[in-house]
Image (spheres, grey):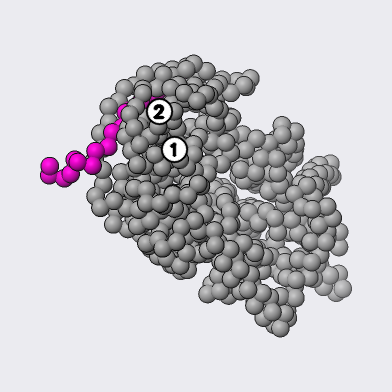
Amino acid sequence: MKARIFSFTVPLAAALFMFFYLLDVGYESSMRGLDLSWHAMLGYAHENRLQHGSQIIFNYGPLSFIESGIYFEHTHREKLLYRAAYLLIVGIGCLAVLHIRSAWALLAWCGLTLHLIMWRDVYLLLPALLLCHHECRREQGNAAQLAISLLLAFGAAFACLVKANAMFLTLPAIVLASIYRFTVRDYRPIVPVCFAVSIVLLFWLSGQHVSGFFGFVRGYLDVSLAYGADMGLPAPFALHAAFIVGAAAVVATTLRVTHPASTVLGLLTLGYLLVAYKMGFVRHGAHPGAAFLALAFVCVVHLWGPGGDLLARNKRRVLAAVAVAAASLVTYILAVLLPHGAVIKGYVHVVEHRIRYVVDPGYRAVQDAESRRRYGMALTEARSAIPFVDMEGPIDIFPFEFSLAYASGLPIATRPAFQSYYATSRHMSAHNADFLASPQAPRSVVFSVTPIDGRYAALEDPLTLRAYRQHYQVDRQTPNALLLTRRASPLAQSALCRTSEVGFDLPLLIPWVGPDQAVWAEMDVSTTWLGRIVSVLTGPPILRMTIATPMGSTDFRYLREAGKTGFLLSPALVSTEAAANFFNGESRPEDNVLGLSIHQPSAAMPWFDEKITVKLCVLSWDSAHKAGQ
């Protein structure tokens, strides 16, 4: 009897720890900056029921407000309710699927869970991972096991509406599990139907129009493709190699092509690790902790899952070694990111705070009051950073810093792809440009030149810059920002184009343009078939470009997606002054671009075709060309 009680209380303790620890989100004391600005947008979008796929395009979905680090008083309790529901589902799934039976296993699970405070993306992958493992071992006619599968399918649907990477794992996992169930002659597709119904129901409950569901999915796909093509940051080769070696060991240990269930789980693991690799190594550079934490979790699921007892001793040792190594590396990355000694102390403080927050109403009231106070301070800080007063709403901010628009108190009319750095594809940038041409466009835009990662500024949301030239004019200017206000009528635009080809590292001569003209460039850097295959696994290499002006040559990062969409190449919009002159139709000769070259990446394999197709258009604007004239 004691053994049975112990075997139940240990996994229950693991599930409760995950619930208490992850229920409350630590709110930030500021809303300024690149990341906190989109955190503010997640909360604002939910409060105002913005429609994903049309009014907002991002790799976070309609339930992503539960991940926002900005306090919103009106939705704080709703956030806790949604998080509680999701964490209970994950906890019950872990309780049912994983055989956590010893104190050591409990400590290992809680230790991995501690890291989720930094990389919460990983827990969004757990429902699909657990579901597929459970489905491959579920007995026909077992109603209790079927109930767990349905619960995990609902949790997987929930995760899909939080962030795109969960959807990219869940859909293949559902397909693989369904195929396996067909092979064991369980022909009733209850689980996939439950998943489909759940995701549509949750989409509707989150304030979205069901008719816009496929537009929302299209946005997920487009943002993710743009991220994969242009958002990667360089990571040390050793980290790439360490992850690939660990992933290969896990797949080789768990994949048995002669056994249907093992084949399915091996393919699932391969897809999971691919998503984890993208999740960790895109945008995070030298700190891809999410990828290694996901690697540790998949090892644990294989060890403690329904088929873990069937693994040979050597295979279990390999999985345990990979899990320990991956978790140790995550701890090391955290130690580098956080101040010395703050990792252990920080975890202890967070665990204590979050458990007290759930069980102590008085403590919870005090903490909520503190969150409101810090929110007021953050709002005041953001409001004081707005560079202009007496603006007319509705308002938008370019290139990011949505928090300034929110803090202004004015009506907001932000672009659907609201942060310029990821709006590099034609779909997103054209969506933004169409919005700026519509009656819903903002009256005022606070504009600044703030590219990230050493990019050429005009490559970020390129069609929006072109739309600003047509529809807006400079009202006021500070050293670091412009206030653009909407024109009474848009400028007419004409273009004279020519197409040619150029090789890597060879200079491309750029036409000289007048003060009220610009050169628009569309450049197709095509990937070879080998490059397309390898880029699915590792992502493409970073491309560099050099532009030459009368003032000298400068190197920038080149973005393939934006280059294919087209961008304003000349004049060079690399400063606030240059942007002001461009929008006023008074560009200076020293801002003209004379030449451009794209540099071949140094690599052992041919990533890209040798020739680059280039279309250059000289754009002109004329306010005298009115409709009907």
- The residue that label 2 is drawn on is 589
Q: Identify which residue is drawn at 54% across, 48% down.
A: 168
Q: Quadrant of the N terminus?
A: bottom right
Q: Secondary structure at mark 2?
A: helix
The range drawn in magenta is 611-629
Q: Identify which residue is drawn at 34% across, 21% down.
A: 499
Is residue 77 part of the magenta span, yes or no?
Answer: no
Pick the front one: 520 or 143: 520
Q: Secondary structure at mark 1?
A: helix
Q: Residues within 10 Å of mark 2 (few under 14, many from 20)?
A: some
Rendered location of residue 106, percent (x, y): 81, 62
Q: Is residue 544 above or below residue 239?
A: above
Q: Main secondary structure of the magenta part?
A: strand
Q: Is residue 435 left or right of residue 404?
A: left
Rendered location of residue 171, percent (x, y): 52, 50
Pick the front one: 134 or 441: 441
Q: Is residue 20 visible?
A: yes
| Residue 97 figure quarter | bottom right
- The residue that label 1 is drawn on is 578
Is residue 615 part of the magenta span, yes or no?
Answer: yes
Q: CA distance from mark 2 to mark 1?
A: 11 Å
Q: Identify which residue is drawn at 52% across, 74% down.
A: 74
Residue farthest left in this picture: 628
Rendered location of residue 399, percent (x, y): 48, 48
Q: Is residue 399 above or below residue 203?
A: above
Q: Identify which residue is drawn at 46% across, 23% down.
A: 550
Which numbered disc flags the more N-terminal residue, 2 or 1?
1
Rendered location of residue 232, percent (x, y): 59, 38
Q: Amino acid at mark 2?
A: Pro
| Residue 253 figure quarter | top right
Q: Amino acid at mark 1?
A: Ala
